[in-house]
Image (cartoon, helix red, strand yellow):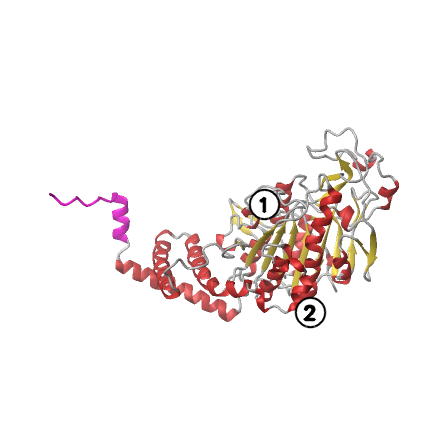
Amino acid sequence: MQPPSPTLAPPGLLAHAAAVSRRSILAGAGLGLGMTAFRALLADDAGEAGGLPGLPHAAARAKRVIYLFQSGGPSQLDLFDPKPVLAKRHGEELPESVRDGQRLTGMTAGQKSFPLAASPYRFAQHGAGGAWFSELVPHLARVADRLCVVRSLVTEAINHDPAITFMTTGAQLAGRPSLGAWLSYGLGSENRDLPAFVAMISRGSGRPEDQPLYDRLWGSGFLPSRHQGVKFRSQGDPVLHLSNPAGIDAGRRRDMLDDIVSLNAVRREAMGDPEIDTRIAQYELAFRMQSAVPELVDISSEPRHVLDLYGPDVTRPGSFAANCLLARRLSERGVRFVQLFHMGWDQHTSLPKQLPLQARDVDQAAAALVTDLEERGLLDETLVVWGGEFGRTAYCQGTLTPAAFGRDHHPRCFTMWLAGGGVKGGHVHGETDDFSYNVARDPVHVHDLNATILHLLGIDHTRLTSRFQGRHFRLTDVHGTVVRDLIAS
């Protein structure tokens, strides 16, 4: 019998194989690995990995951000913005002069009646600034003097996906870099063993099966992909493929990565594709994370009083409380931007049943995060942001009953709060009308909020740009004004 004929490779593949000779591999690897190592050494000397020359533009009040994103649209009327008029006019029609022809969602546009719904929850003033807090958030009320409450946020989108996309990227259409990606791009990371940007998701008790969230919300858009957020999971490895496969030890893993980096370096020199640099850097980061991440997520060393501070859910992986504690641990290790997405705030119906559960999820843990950062001396340099993509309507969606009423989406005014990082503690900014339907004083647009966040990090929002498709893009598009009244003197 004749031996089988060798399989012929396509001519293009043979040509490419010939080009990647042993000499070119060694030459390219020497240059690629040498430059990678050189950049790493420079980053070590500077105390940071990456970032743009000349940034920050000015002295920074904050070094890092923890963004507690409440997905679904928390009701400002039931948490932070009480309206006594609604109690007096409960069940009456929303005055047309208040709505003034503003658009409604498809879920309530067909309603023939828009009955006003008073909040069933008691409110009280707290702290030196006299901020109002609902009985649903007693722990946040206790840290009122640390919070800067903004009651006059305004957004442009009326439905969830474009509204969340707008809050996180500054545009309603997908494809732009997220806030965390812009910060990674501009400022880099303070810890080479961890990502500059980490995202985590928790499901709310009020609506566990609320609308989905997409990875593009923490994506890098047209920026190099190394700036996208790394999603930490609550089950298995915190990061996919973090553990070595069975039978592969750290030494063999290191040898394998060296070979892969060598080949990538050759390809980079041949193609000039900057994404290959990203691939090399991400392989190296993944290798370093194999040591850094297990220690990070192991909370067994946390004192009992700290665990008690965050509440009983802190030991349940994937809960908002557990993610808040991880956010603190990430921040104290120099991670630039941590974004927690807590789902379940979309109370179209059954608000009296769902909203207390949602508030219980986040109240103690969010207050604990502020307290914990302060006790560790980190709050002054860590900006904490809490809020969702829009607010809720003063009128009821569907039939108004004591036990089952709901509120529709409302972009015209909603409440967020900030803490630490150079903002005024115990301060209340802005005011809404008697129905919490329109801003009555000091509106803050989403672009204004993002411009202010960047300013606190020492960044001029008009100068942090990236050229794409023939124009320079930025997080705040062509808008945005820093809200000086939110910043501590």
Residue designated by label 2 = 375
Identify the element where label 1 is drawn.
loop
Q: Is residue 263 magenta?
A: no
Answer with the quarter of the image where residue 365 lies: bottom right
Q: Which mark is residue 213?
A: 1
Residue 106 vs residue 177, the one in the foreground: 106
Look at 36% across and 58% down and name the residue there.
260
Q: Amino acid at mark 1?
A: Leu
Asked whether the viewer can see residue 383, the reply is yes
Q: Residues within 10 Å of mark 1 (few under 14, many from 20)?
A: some
Q: Amino acid at mark 2?
A: Glu
Residue 201 vs residue 373, the one in the foreground: 201
Q: Residues within 10 Å of mark 2 (few under 14, many from 20)?
A: few
Q: Say left or right for 171 vs 85.
A: left
Q: Which span of residues is magenta-colored?
A: 1-19
Q: Check the image and report above or below for 270 versus 437.
A: below
